[in-house]
Every structure is written in structure tokens, then in C-alpha cells.
Image (cartoon, grey):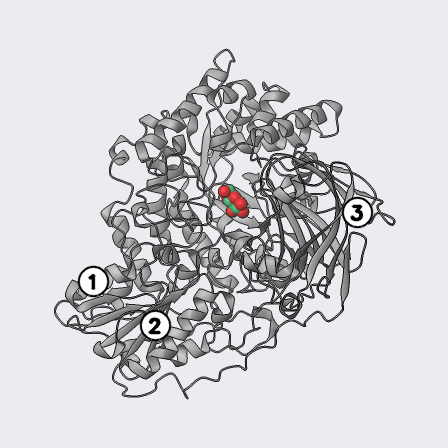
Amino acid sequence: MDHLPAWPRLLSDIGIDRAVEEAARGILVQMTVEEKIGQMIQPDLVELTAEDVRAYRIGSALNGAGRWPGGNRRSGAKEWASTISEFWEAAEEAYRDRPFRIPFMWASDAVHGHNNVHGATIFPHNIGLGAARDPELVRRIGAATAREVAATGMDWTFAPTVTTPRDLRWGRCYEGYSQDPEIVHAYAHAMVKGLQGEAESLRAGSGVVSCVKHWVGDGGTFEGEDRGIARCSEDELRNVHSRGFFAGIEAGAQSVMVTYSGWEGSGRVETRIHGSQYLVTDVLKDALGFDGIVIGDWDAHPYVEGCTPGDAGNVIRAGVDVLMVSTREKWQAVYRSAVEQVRSGAIPMSRIDDAVLRILRVKQRAGLWDKQPPAERRPEDRATALGAPEHRELARTAVRKSLVLLKHDNAALPLARTSKVLITGSAADAVRKQTGGYTVTWQGDDVGMDDFPGGLTVADAVRSVVGEDRCTVDPHLEHADPSEYDVVLVAIGEDPYAEMFGDIKPWRSIAYAELKPAYAHDLAVLRRLRESASKVVTVAFGGRPLYMTEEINLSDAFVAAWLPGPDARGITDLLFLDAQGQRAHDFQGRLSFAWPRGRHAATVDSGHEPLFPYGYGLTLQATGDAATGSTGPLPLDEEEETAGAPSLTASRVAIGPGTDPYVFEYSATDNGPQPIASESRTETAFISVEPIDHLGHRDAISLTFRDIRTFVYARESGGKPYDLRDLAAAGGRLSFHVRVFEAPAGPFHLTCHDDYPQQPALDIADRLRELPVGEWVPFEVPLAELAAVGVEFDHVDVPFMVYTEQPARLDIGGIQLVATPRA
Ligand code: BGC
């Protein structure tokens, strides 16, 4: 790809159309301020009623992940379309006595198929598609997805994600097609074409509005931190992180979603792109010439300086056109504050008109004025499009094309259909490890086979090939004797996650077996098999390549299967001969990310030599007849075990507040970490917090929790976690002073942790309730007590955390870790 020395002017395939512009402008000039702001606010399904749409003239809504009509996760196309129709009708009524109407528009995250909807076809996540190196396949997946989305009465999908992830620790790595901007560029174009089609299909309704996201640099954040800051030159931002946007916009993408993250580079600091007039207006709109909707991400506005949960003024001023706002309280507050700021002139009317013109333009291009209410559209597809056999066949093909064969020795594959097979490993029969995040629910961690009619886990798929009798499933290798089988199939892989929940913290290794005890168990199983199994074939699921050298060395064949979806037949298609005893398919996938050689080789740009380079992938054709090693000299070099975090040796460590290097922060479930101001009160909808004097200056904090889950914690600002295991074993304690004004109304948790938010915690509510009201008293918890509820101490960067979701009012100060046991 040519290097771009400046931001290019892009030419969209869906260009300016005079009739569209005239219609949009004709409406815009008649609109009131309230009507305009209503078009700019996008609430979520469960925080919006038809009455709200009428009252606030709301222009669009989304169903966030895990939100379904009536809370029913099994809702089908009919329920979806009729729910969406209610909102559509409300919008029609809202304009009944106006000389114009503005149709309603519905959005969803159909990011790997229509993944929030029961019965829909689930395609492999983008990382798998990247390995397929097949833009035409991607276009077809887009078209199939659009058909399913349209069949549920929706108009708009927040896809494709065109990020270029450069750090494997990033929890959203799997949402990216590749570390290589060239693939992202080709696929962005193909997916937008598939989803939207050409101008006419979008207007007619076989295509849906697409959205390239997240503008810009989200794949380049420092240490792979989700919602972090990308530190790179503007040249890199343009040539590495923007290529997918260029291609998507040229293909006609009608919306762009802004990233939560920020950018620091070329002498510029844009701590949040949502607040960056330069990147949103000057670059995206003015330089590139994007003329569709710029949408903000879910509740991203409070991250921007000067904004609060109820005020998105600075985000609107920066150039964002539609604001996705979570709760009713918040979207109504954002609506009101925006109207006020327009009235006072703090937000220029020209900015609002730009936003609304774009919204009306996209609605025009989507043909909404000519469309029927959602429940009456595409009746032929209502009962047949979701999970249509041809779509499922396409998904199965996509799985076959996405698998990458990393190792093939001893002519291990293909397997005969008469083989006696033992299936083991944590992913043997766990569909959620195949489907990953953004599947039915946000994290995708609570799904089961009931969620996927027609789905097959690896175990199911193998059973369907070799028959029940020849197949034993023993995920933890507790019962079976491996020596009794022709082959042991080991299915391993990451548990599902989405966004920051998938981040691997910078002080941790990216070794699979070091990430979770269950993954270590998978390695232990492989070690045991070395002694007892005649042939080991490993299939590894997951959202990114991880350090797995020993796992690879212990396998005769090793397949990277990414996040293929609920139907594992695409995997068995490649592992087994067909019914005629022929090899019907061969591996075609090639790595779209380099495979790491070391436990800390997480960053693409660090110059580490990979274990398997970008583009690597074996075929059976090339390696099948070789009796011995075909992947080069074996075994591959394994790294020494890493040394852990340093132990804490001091006898007493003051944590604060006000004690370096600890910083105090708070965060609510739907809001990112926020620093606690050191000299003033911070007042939010979920917490009020203020540093106060106790024994010294500002050495305590006064806390009022409300009824939203909120965390308050001390974090080591230098990112130097401690290993507190010795301290815990030696009777160490977490000690502080507390003054209770209103005892917690519900559970009140205390913990230490390194792995937010997965660590368990101790409920200290009862103990707090027993304390005298309004009096400072000492409070101590032995670390052993935290250990007993499951807190792990090997890498602790947050030595103190409390959280609750019920009201409570108390002061806490003088927090410290104390090594000596109490006399
Ligand atoms: C994600 C977006 C998504 C949005 C709506 C956010 O948390 O970052 O990718 O489109 O939620 O569900």
C-alpha cells in the first residue's frame, strides 16, 4: 500500500444526491431546537418508551448487547420487528401535526452475524475472517448479516470494526481483522459493500446502514489498554490505524463511531477522541470529506474533559452528531443540557444543523421515508432469514477458511472417521469458548447450547462424525485412559470476554497457561498426554495468539481456531476425512497476526521475532505425507518461567490517600475510572467523594454511595504490582480507620486485586453496621481472610478497594498494609 503523506480526500460510492440534499434541508429549516436535539440522542431499548419518543422526538435507538424485547433473550424476528415498530409508530405520531415527518431508525451491534438475536447465524469473529484472506467471503457474510438484520426490522448495524490492533493484550483484539492495515483496508471495503450494498440496495432495504468503528487509533493504545491512549505519530495514525476507515468510507459507509480512547502524538494530546475537534471535524469531516453520521460510543461523553454524565456539550462541539447514552436519567439530562447550551449560544446552531443534516441525509439514503413500519417490511424474510440454511453453510465455510494449521507432524491429520477419539480440554464442550464476547450478551460468558439452535460444540461435531460409540468426552481428563484411543483431541482456549474485560494487564505475561488456573490445567492435561496418548491434536480457541509454545510442542498437530462461532462442523470438516474417505478440504488460513515467541512479546511493533510470522499457515497437502517434523526444527524453544512481581518486604506500607505512589480513583459499572480530586468534592449520580483531614492533611476520604454499583480504590500509579503472598502467609493485614454515618444498606465489599473486576471480595457490611455512628474507629482485615474468599495476591496493583451498589455514607482514612501479625 502506498504511504499517505497527508489525509486523503475520499470519494464515497454513495455520493451527494440533489434530491436527498433538498429533502433533508427542506426538513431541517422547519425544525425546532428540541426536535433537532431529539434526533441527536440515541437511547437504549430498555431505557426508552414509545412515550419518550413522542415527548422528546427521539430519532433513533439501539439495543445494547444483551438487551432484548421484553427482556426475553429468545425473542425472534417477529418480536423484534414489532417492538421496533412501536417506536417507529411513536415517532410518526410525534410529527403528526407537523408539516413534515422524520422516520425512526434502529441500530444494533451485528458484529459477527446478528449476534444479539436468538436463532441468527453467528459467523466467526473478525480475527478469524482475517486469517481467511478472502474479501469476497467477507462481502457475502455482510450481505447475509444485512438480510438477517433487516428481517428483524432494524436499519443500522455498528459494524464493521476496522481497527488495526497492534497489541495482543488488548481485550478487543479479536474484533480486528488483522494487525496489517492492508487486510483491514480490503475487508472494510468488502464488509461495507456486503452490509449496505450499493446506493439502491440501501434505499430499497436489502442493505442496512453500516458503521466503521472506532475512529481512530483504538488498536494502538499504550500497553493494549482498552479505552487507553494511542501514542504514535500522526503519520502512523493515518497509515496504520485509519486505512479501514478510508476503505469503508469509500465503499459508502454511512456512519463512523468514535473510539473511547485518546491519542498523544506529533506534539498534540487529544486525551479523548470524543473531545477532539481536530480528529472528528477537521480530519474526518473536513479533510476526508465524510458526509454521514459521526456517532459517539456508549456513554463515552463523561470521559471528555468538561463533560459529565448529564452534559455532552464538549463532545457535540467537537463534531459528534449522535450520542449513545445509557440510562434514562442520563439521556434526558444530556438532552436538556444540549437544548440549554444551544439556546445560550454555547453550542452554535451551525454545529447542530451540521449534525441533523447528516442524520436526515443518512435516513434519506436509507429510504426511510418510503419504507413501511418495521413490522410490515420484508414479510418473506421474517420467518426464514434468521439462521437461513444458506447463511449457516456460509458460516461453516468461513470457519473452514479461517483455521490456521500451525503444526503438523507425524502425518497426524486427517483423521479417519472410524477413529476412536477422546476429546479433552477446557473447550471440549464449551460453546462460549467458540463464540466469544458480543454473542447474545456483552461478555458472551453466560451462553449455552440453548442459545444456539443447531449449534455444535467440538464434542458434538466429532460425535456427529465418528458416532457416539467411538467418542468419549472428558474435558478435565478425569476418567478416560488416553492410551485406549486412536487420537486425543484437545480443545483449549480463552474464556469469552468483551472490551476491557479482556485486557491482559501489562505486568502479566501473555502465556496461556499463566493467565488462569483453568488454562494451566489444559497445559497439565497436555503434559499428561505426552506419556499416554499415541496422537494428540490440539485445537486452540481464543481472541488472539498467545504464548503457547509448550502446548504446541506437546501436540502432533496444532490448529488456531480463533472464535469460530457455535457450529464446530467447520473444524471437523478439516480434521476428518469425508464419508468417502477423501480429504474434501484442506487448511487455507494464514495468520493475520504474528504468533508470539515469548511471554512478553505482546506488541506487534516491538520488533520481537515471532514464533510463527504473519502470513504463516500449513496445509495438509504440503505436509501430509511427511512422516516426521514438517514445521522446522522441533521442539520449538520454550522460554524460561518468568519471575513474578517483587514481594513486599516493608513492615508497614501507607496507601493513603495522599500517599505516593498511590492514586485514588472511583468508577461505576458503566463509567470508566475517574480520579478522585485531591482538594474538592466530586459529585456524580452514583457517588459523592471528597478528601478530608483525619490525622493529617487530606489523608481520608468521605464517601456517599448511592444505588449504582461504584468502586473506590487505591491504585499504584507506577504500575508496579506487588506479590503479597508472603505478607499474607506471615499474618499481614489491611488496616484503616473508618467513621460510619450511614451503615451500608446492602453488601459492602473490600478487596485487594490485580485483575479488575474479576477478583472476589469480602463483604464487611455486617462489621460496619456494628460500629458506633459518627466516630473514627480502627478497622483491620487479615489478608488471609481475603485469601479465604478467593482473592489472589501474586500481582497486586490495587491494594485497597471497596465497592457497593447500595447507599452508604462513611469516611475512610489512614489505609495501610501491615506486615506484623497482631499481638
Ligand atoms: C462498544 C461499541 C458498541 C457499543 C454499543 C460499546 O461499549 O465500544 O463497539 O457499538 O457499545 O453496544
Instruction: Check contact, mark 2 vs mark 1: CB within 8 A.
Output: no
Residue at left offset 17%, top offset 70% = 417
Q: Label 3's element?
A: strand
User: Is residue 304 placed above or below 761 in the rendered structure?
Assistant: above
The crowd level at tag 2 (other Cα within 10 Å; few <14, some 14-19, many 20+) is: many
Q: Is residue 555 visible?
A: no
Q: Residue 387's x, y, as percent?
A: 28, 45
Tell me the quarter of the image containing the C terminus: bottom right
Q: Which residue is denoted by mark 1 in the rendering?
A: 463
Q: Residue at x 60, y 52 (%)?
A: 216
Tell whether 413 sits left or right of 351.
Answer: left
Q: In the figure, 748 relative to 400: above or below? A: above
> Which amino acid does the dot numbered 1 rest on?
Arg
Disc with the residue nearer the chain's start (1 vs 3) = 1
Tell me the tag on residue 700.
3
On the picture, is 519 further left or further right than 699?
left
Residue nearest the observer in this picture, 47 or 202: 47
Image-quadrant location for residue 745: top right
Q: Residue 712 in the image: x percent, y percent? A: 68, 47
For marks 1 and 3, give the CA distance: 61 Å
Q: Mark 2 to mark 1: distance in Å?
A: 17 Å
Q: Tell me the kind of residue under disc 2.
A: Thr
| Residue at mark 3 to residue at mark 2: CA–CA distance | 53 Å
